[in-house]
Image (cartoon, rainbow, N blue to C red):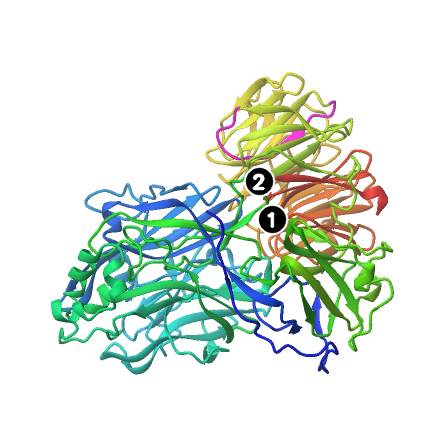
Amino acid sequence: MKTTILTISSVLIVAAAIPSLAAEPIDIGSRRELFVDDYLIDRLTSEAELRLHHPTPREIVMVHGEPWEGNTTTYHCVFKDGDRYRMFYVGRNSTIRKGQLNIGPSSFCYAESEDGIHWRKPKLGLSEFQGSKANNIVMNTAAADQHNARLGAPAVFRDENPQATRDARYKMFLSSKSPIGMLPMKSPDGIHWSPMSDKPVVTNGAFDSMNLAFWDSERGEYRAYWRYFTGGTTNEKEWKPAGVRAIRTASSKDLLHWEAQADLSYQSSREMELYENGIHPYNRAPHLLIGFPVRYVDRAGAPSLTPSDGSDRAGPERIRNWPASMGALPDFEQRRARAALSERYGSALTEGLFMSSRDGVNFHRWDEGFLRPGIERPGTWNYGQQFVAWRSVETASTLEGAPNELSLYPSEGTWLGKKGKTLRRYTLRLDGFVSAHASAKGGELLTKPIVFSGQRLSLNFATSAAGSIRVGIEHPNGKSIDGFSLADCPPHFGDTLDRAVVWNNQQEPGQLAGTPVRLRFVLQDADLYSFRFYETPRADRAVHTANRTLRGHAGSTTGLAWHPDGKLLACGCFDKTIGIWDVETGTRRQTFSGHTHYVYCVAWNRDGTKLASASYDGTVKLWDARTGRELWTNRDHATAVLGVAWSPDGSKLASGSLDKTVQVLNAADGKTLQVLKGHTHYVISVSWSPDGKTLASGGFDNVVRLWDPISGKASGTLDGHTDAIEMVYWSPDGKRLASGGRDLSAILWAMPEGRKLHVLKGHSRRIESVSWTPDGTQLATGSQDKTVKVWSTRTGELLHTLSGHEEPVRGVVWSPNGKLLASGSDDHSIRIWDMSRR
């Protein structure tokens, strides 16, 4: 099925060719900008318009048929958490009596996926249901009762606040009973929860829909959204709502104290009933908040709030007065039976909308349906359909060779009393909510004056085979800038998420950075979804073999290790394999298979004849590098192993595990020689000093621990990180040690005294990997912010920022000659950067 689109008339007044006088230019920096509103647009010509695009329905990804999920499953939330996708939802049994909806015991449940398509419900063993704990229940009604709360509509989020503590990595709100309000909860893992307060922190509202919050990294604050009614009374003593359902927001620095409460404002004055809101930062442009509220529509004119006296029950006479189209919709007999309980349950319809905001309060809401009820078939065109799970997530395309796409998860329209409610995945082009569109007749979009930073301009666009896009850069007064005029820009055509604009003189627009300019886009049979200016270098600038992207793995590429000869690169991957890549040709020479879970780390011995690997399956394996034959497997760790490193003489290996231990292994037979205990939390990384006398380890207890690998005794600690440490790495001369972690910093330590030399800050999300150049003059860091940064180890100065990965960077490593830098990412690729050219 093709993605359908909705065309709306131009939202801007068509004016003459002379640009309007503008206020101060808008500083967009190097942000990705989407056309979801008219914020940046001065004008569109009569042949250009903004066009809302509709997601395409894909496969059913979840069937809620478990007994504890009941006949109603609601309030799904989905997010990407490192290497996996996580889903939380509420299942319950609901009935209608005397027109009123009665909610039975509820179960707060959990599911997870490696690709966002195939989901599993792990048996958590936490809550008993009918005598068994073999279920995926995180919390039941009895557990919520202990906190004076209801399992109404919790929305779990991973807290990206750099100050968030380990025991509060995940947060959500429960609905408190008395007084009614939002009760903050925290968790170290999303599964085990405890209250942050003994009373609700927000009480001004109804709170009978999804109560959600998130950390807004752009504004450095938490933001929450919840339901209220525009009239009536909604408290624990009296529940008589009136008016319409609406959305309220507030901000906070600590999730406990909220201020600046405000009702959402829309550019459209049209009043409508909104269920849920689905508001969250858009991952590719976090300065933009996007939302998927659900619109309630009653085509029979029934009240949207069910009267307590049962007067809303619709008999045959009232149903005969329904619009004729109601009788043509699917499942009319079921619809009529529901109306006999409460008319709106039979006559109402729901669909998803799209809206966006740049400040969290004022929203551009598209009044046209975004997620329509769809083609008529059983179970569709009902009240309760198209409730969209909180958050859109980026997933790999199922079309071979295609780029990633956005996945959304709306509920299918099954009704109360019928088990097996389903969740269907819908997909949309990245940034593809709205486009600036022009037909084959052509059209123009002119921006307001802007100021940008960066060297090059990239577009996300699609044209027909005969269509095109051209870009001109102009002074604020409309005068073309030499070398960057429309006449200098050849037609760009194709269908791509990221195409650098070129002008005939091959100049880059970076020379205009910091200067007020306008962009003039000329479109012909084309859609322009987004644009951004970016810094060079980028991995895709050069096409020669020493600067390439290696693709072929089916999962995140994490552990990277160069062969000592510098020609081969080993990659541990979340597809449970190890790939051996020829960097010069870009081909995969070998694949080592044998692990049963993610491969996190790989390491060559010094002559390149053997390769060690550490895996989430709890094992360390040693391989014959020439044949790929498994030589031995060590299973002495109690759980996942995330780090492995060779001793300099090649006689031993060290491994670090989530069981909080470091183990020293005999490289000849894999037997454990020492078990080093002292960490109080997960061990993520291990590294031998070049002289072999000291072993360093780092993990979730925020400290670097030093060990004597012969005696097994602790020899010191390095305390300086404020959050978990993801990697430790000795410098080639052994005089310094680098550590990088979740506090967004890398620290260079002078050894053996343990003195801080430099604290490297610049990443906007946690650092996953660090690597020294062979001469020790530079350090590379890979981060969840999707970038690789290169630093001077002498001064601590940032030398390069390498952008190109579309997902978090998991691993970085320098080649033996220091000319090439490899990086692996959750986007399943390995990028090779030629640093000799930088």
Q: Which residues are magenta?
A: 594-607
Above or below residue 103? Residue 429 is above
> Where does the image place residue 493, in percent across and percent down from the top left?
69, 51
> Where does the image place residue 784, in percent across and percent down from the top left?
61, 51
| Secondary structure found at label 2 | loop
Relative to 646, is 68 on the left or the right?
A: left
How many numbered discs sit on the rendered protein? 2
Q: Which mark is residue 725?
A: none
> Where does the image place residue 414, in percent across and percent down from the top left?
27, 53
Tags 2 and 1 in contact by the CB under 8 Å rule? yes
Residue annotated with mark 2: 556
> Where does the image place residue 135, in percent across and percent down from the top left?
29, 43
Is tag 2's residue or tag 1's residue first in the polypeptide sequence?
Answer: 2
Relative to 268, is 317 on the left or the right?
A: left
Q: Answer whether residue 700 is visible to the viewer in this image.
A: no
Q: Answer whether residue 66 is visible to the viewer in this image.
A: yes
Name which residue type carries label 1: Glu
Residue annotated with mark 1: 807
The local crowd at label 1, few if under 14, some if 14 to 19, many if 20 or more residues have their Cα within 10 Å, is many
Relative to 784, is 249 on the left or the right?
A: left
